[in-house]
Amino acid sequence: MSKTALTAVRPSDDNDRLAVSLLSEFRAAWSTGDHDQMSAVMLAAHELDMAHPDEPRLMDEIRGIRSHGQSAYLAAA
């Protein structure tokens, strides 16, 4: 593989690691009810999505966590 091909792949790998990290942070904030941290992570996720429009949207993943958590909460009530 050429050096150019490696360079083209690396930013996506960095973005993937950042997305996984943000999802982990969001899950931790969700589980403790830390709304300030959830907001901060959502802002960072939105910025990542806007910077890389051709990649899967991280905010869609976060919305899935939120809607699943809310439906589980409502089912338990």
Image: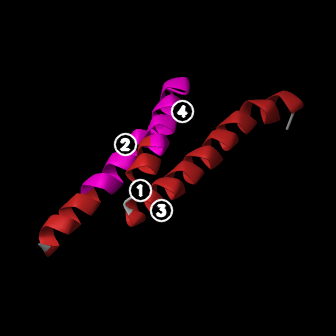
- Callout 2 touching callout 1 (CB < 8 Å): no
Check residue 60 in the rendering and tell me which mark sits there, or answer none. 2
- Percent of width and height locating residue 1: 85, 38
**Residue at which label 3 appears:** 28
- Percent of width and height locating residue 71: 19, 62
**Residue at which label 4 appears:** 48
Farthest-out residue, bottom: 76
Gap between marks 2 and 1 measured at Cα: 20 Å
**Residue at which label 1 appears:** 34
Q: Splitting the image into 4 quarters, where does residue 6 fall?
A: top right
Q: Which of marks 2 and 1 is nearer the N terminus?
A: 1
SS category of the residue bearing label 3: helix
Gap between marks 4 and 2 measured at Cα: 12 Å
Left of 37 or right of it: where is 51? right
- Tell me if residue 22 comes above or below residue 71 in the rendering: above
Q: Splitting the image into 4 quarters, where does residue 39 fall?
A: top left
Gap between marks 3 and 1 measured at Cα: 8 Å
Magenta region, main secondary structure: helix
Image point 41% across, 56% down: which residue? 34
- Camera-near label (4 vs 1) is 1
- Percent of width and height locating residue 70: 22, 59
Where does the magenta region start and end?
Answer: 40-67
Image point 54% across, 49% down: which residue? 22
Q: In which quarter of the image is the C terminus?
A: bottom left
Name the foreground residue: 51 vs 70: 70
Label 4 CA crowd tier, 10 Å (few <14, some 14–19, many 20+): some
- Callout 3 touching callout 1 (CB < 8 Å): yes
- Residue 46: say if magenta: yes
Q: Can residue 55 be seen in this view?
A: no
Left of 3 or right of it: where is 77? left
Q: Earlier in the sequence, mark 3 or mark 1?
A: 3
